[in-house]
Image (cartoon, rainbow, N blue to C red):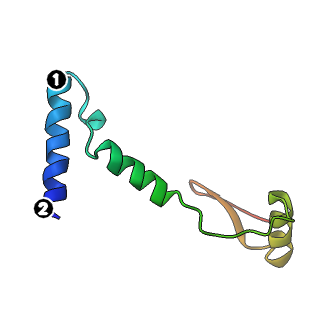
Amino acid sequence: TIERMAGHWRNLLTGMCRDVNQRIADLPLLSVDERQDTLRDWNRDLAVYPSEYCAHQRIETQAGRTPLAIALNFGAEQLSYQ
């Protein structure tokens, strides 16, 4: 909303006034509360995993089901479960 955008602008201006020598990338856009809300909401894990299995057991199960599937991407490299 416009009110929220105005708040972001106010946060930027306040940050600039606090330290005129800081980098632009370090200026605050979100308020402390908005930042906490965003971190909490975006990091919320809604998936329910069976507690009787450890992470390595879940990976072994997936590898058995789909051995040729991509298990890991890193840059241009890909690794399958095999």
Query: Would you place residue 77 above or below residue 70 in this image?
Result: above
Q: Quadrant of residue 18?
A: top left
Query: Would you place residue 65 above or below residue 39 in this image?
Result: below
- Residue type, mark 2 in image: Ile
The one of 5 and 77 positioned closer to us in this rendering: 5
N-terminal of the pair, mark 1 or mark 2, is: 2
Q: Residue at x 37, y 48 (%)?
A: 35
Furthest toward the front, the residue is: 33
Tell me if mark 1 has few (under 14), some (14-19) or many (20+) residues whose alpha carbon lies within 10 angstroms of its own: few
Left or right: 55, with 2 as reference point? right
Camera-side mark, 1 or 2:
2
Q: Position of residue 24 (x, y in %)?
A: 23, 34
Q: Residue at x 64, y 70 (%)?
A: 47
Q: Residue at x 20, y 23 (%)?
A: 19
Left or right: 20, with 48 as reference point? left
Tag on residue 20? 1
- Residue type, mark 1 in image: Val
Which residue lies under the disc numbered 2?
2
